[in-house]
Image: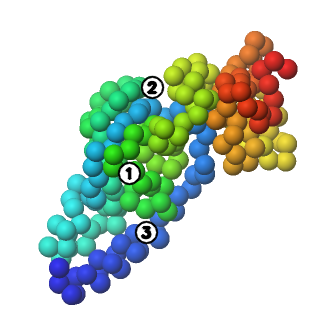
């Protein structure tokens, strides 16, 4: 790589990194599952950095061409799908051998480690799966009792319910289970389910308790 090209590329990548901003906040497992176009577990086998047009960074450097500003850098993660917990018509058309994510966390991108099995939710774009910080992705080994019962069926059965953050006690709604602000505790131990009469409440899965309401109340 020539001495003139390297500074240009570094400047370009710097501009890319700070020109996009992620606008979502911490996703809830149940909400993410219900909003997603897929929910899977998969082992990450490799990762490569590409622009959205499918070209590598080195190909642009070799040609001394500036990529179009819409050609954002992405990671292509090769995966082996182990289990499918949610599928949609759009998911049926995708190449299930890889997922993509933006290269920068400022653009809602996430980093996946090769050799790790992940629980992933996301959406489909141009016939391939996309994961981001706007949906839930986590090492499968870190999932707790509430998460596991949820992805194995309770989330799908209760997608009319939603988990909402408790901010100044203003989220008193029939189809909402309240959760402490930025606390993962509730969903780790329970699933938000619909009770007779239509009200959504927390159903305990784990023995511990950090919940704000209870199915038995």
Name the residue at 76% across, 32% down. Answer: 209
Give the x, y percent position of residue 204: 71, 24
- Please give the count of numbered marks on the rendered protein: 3
- Pointers 1 and 3 in contact (CB under 8 A)? no
Badge number at residue 113: 1
Q: Secondary structure at mark 1?
A: loop
Q: Could you tell which of marks 1 and 2 lies nearer the N-terminus?
A: 2
Which mark is in front, 1 or 3? 1
Q: Secondary structure at mark 3?
A: helix
Task: Name the one closer to the observer, 63 or 194.
Answer: 194
The C terminus lies in quadrant? top right
Q: Could you tell which of marks 2 and 3 lies nearer the N-terminus?
A: 3
When the figure is inspected, residue 133 is found, relative to residue 150, above or below; the finding is below
Q: Report which residue position mark 3 lands on.
A: 17
Give the x, y percent position of residue 205: 67, 24
Q: Report which residue position mark 2 lands on.
A: 85
In the rendered structure, the answer to whether residue 32 lies left or right of residue 90 reads: right
Q: Which residue reaches farthest top?
A: 196
Mark 1–mark 2 Cα distance, whole angstroms, equals 21 Å
Task: Name the one closer to the observer, 150 or 9.
Answer: 150
């Amino acid at each position: 790589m020539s001495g003139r090209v390297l500074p240009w590329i570094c400047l370009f990548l710097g501009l890319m990194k700070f020109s996009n901003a992620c606008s979502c906040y911490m996703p809830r497992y149940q909400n993410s599952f219900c909003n997603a176009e897929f929910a899977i577990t998969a082992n990450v086998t490799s990762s490569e950095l590409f622009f959205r047009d499918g070209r590598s960074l080195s190909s642009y450097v070799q040609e001394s061409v500036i990529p179009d500003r819409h050609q954002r850098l992405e990671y292509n993660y090769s995966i082996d799908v182990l289990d499918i917990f949610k599928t949609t018509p759009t998911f049926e058309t995708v190449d299930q051998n890889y997922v993509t994510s933006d290269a920068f966390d400022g653009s809602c991108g996430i980093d996946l480690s090769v050799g790790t099995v992940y629980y992933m939710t996301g959406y489909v774009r141009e016939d391939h799966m996309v994961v981001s910080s706007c949906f839930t992705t986590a090492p499968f080994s870190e999932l707790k009792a509430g998460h596991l019962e949820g992805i194995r069926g309770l989330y799908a059965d209760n997608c009319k319910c939603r988990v909402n953050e408790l901010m100044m006690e203003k989220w008193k709604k029939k189809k909402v289970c309240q959760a402490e602000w930025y606390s993962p505790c509730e969903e780790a131990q329970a699933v938000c389910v619909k009770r007779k009469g239509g009200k959504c409440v927390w159903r305990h899965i784990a023995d511990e308790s950090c919940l704000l309401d209870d199915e038995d109340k």
